[in-house]
Amino acid sequence: MVCRMCGSDRLETYFDMGLHPPADEFRRKDQLANPVVHYPLEVCLCLDCGLSQLTYVVDPEVLYRHDYPYEASTTATGRKHFADFAETVSTRLDLKAGDLVVDVGSNVGVLLEAFRNRGAKVLGVEPASNIARLAEKRGIETLNEFFSADLAAQIRASHGQAAVITGSNVFAHVDDLNSFMRAVDGLLSGSGVFIFESPDMLSLVKNLEYDTIYHEHLSYLSLKPVVRFCARHGMEVFDVQKQTIHGGSFRVYIARRGARPVLPAVAAALEEEERFNLHSIETMRAFASRAFENRDKLLWLLRSLKHDGAHIAALSAPAKGMSLLNFCRLGRETIDFATEKSTLKIGRYTPGDNIPVLPDSALLERMPSHALLLAWNFSAEIMANMSEYRRRGGKFIIPVPEPRIVS
């Protein structure tokens, strides 16, 4: 194995989370007897460029082609974020009516819908066929493919060059990043901009967001290795904007070298990473140690509650929550059921221990004493939506960065 950004073989593993099933593999009842395939989930650091990345790559056909259950439009917080994303980019780059915006990993098209509402011509690229169909129903033209240089050439021939290419929570999912960047280069206009948004490694480490680690997330991105990687492709990062969504993300603006002035925010972000010593193996080992400590504390809390007669549900079932449940080895002995807003997950069973997923309304119907809030990154919205549960005496448990009960 070599680093997917710089090609170095100087990789050191610092966090072994064990064997996990794919975090989005929610099963139907008729599939429960089928064998479950578990894959290694461990993270290593490139000692040359500083990129954290998984050591094992699960075939993307396995991850995205079989009833992929993630919908980007489920929460009001998420919908507002994408609307603001489109507004900021349109204003920042002075997009004109009819400019082409291509979104890679476009999901149900919520970001492209916001760009279209501002006059852009839009096109989605989405490998999950069930999700691509939902986008088409919204009126968003969507190619049900993985992004590649060949596909980029086809898009250029049929739609013209892109003024903007976006990748929201997708750049970190790509194994062959060099091919990806060649595809971006082939599709962008001369002054075009590639923008990716992703959870940033600095927030992940600072806030102990270890549940963000799962098989879809191949890279754990920070600015230092990204800047170096872009330079290898004749491009440069000219702006970076911190975002609060998903527990802390960054929006990175990339253009061809010299096409746009590099803003001071880039140097400031690099300096912040350096001050934190983010790319040292000692920092990463300390992070892994804290994650194991968190697991012990969470298990002690939940098992103590169960011993005292508590009933515990998992409120929301995001992929990050499945990573946490499997890392902590939490199953039906502790969690009675999970709930969800997404119809793509309701009626199915969680990957690993087959906890039944019920509608959010089950929380009030069954009134477990405690609800483990797995989508803690949307905790304010979810707890507000579930205020009646709290009014009746229900208590929320937020697992990271420190397990705590909110009553």
Image (tube, rainbow, N blue to C red):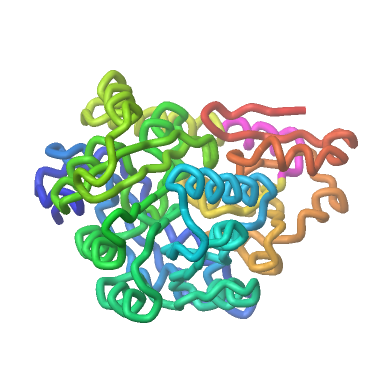
Residue 141 or residue 90, whichever sits in front: 90
Q: Is residue 61 left or right of residue 231?
A: right
In the depicted structure, whether residue 185 falls above or below residue 199: below
**Residue range (magenta):** 300-312
Give x and y (percent) for residue 168. 45, 53
- The total of numbered circles placed on residues is 0
Q: Please report the residue visible at 32 percent of the width from the left and 31 percent of the height from the top.
A: 263
Give x and y (percent) for residue 140. 57, 72
Q: Residue 309: say if magenta.
A: yes
Q: Is residue 289 left or right of residue 391?
A: left
Q: Is residue 101 left or right of residue 403?
A: left
In the depicted structure, whether residue 179 falls above or below residue 233: below
- Quadrant where the C terminus sits is top right
- Quadrant where the N terminus sits is bottom left
Q: Residue 247: say if magenta.
A: no
Residue most extreme to the top: 275
Residue 110 or residue 9, whichever sits in front: 110
Residue most extreme to the front: 96
Give x and y (percent) for residue 333. 63, 50
Which SS type dominates the magenta stretch?
helix
Residue 261 or residue 23, whichever sits in front: 261
Q: Please report the residue visible at 25 percent of the width from the left and 72 percent of the height from the top.
A: 149
- Would residue 33 be visible to someone looking at this image? no
Q: Please report the residue visible at 52 percent of the width from the left and 69 percent of the height from the top.
A: 68
Q: Is residue 187 left or right of residue 367?
A: left
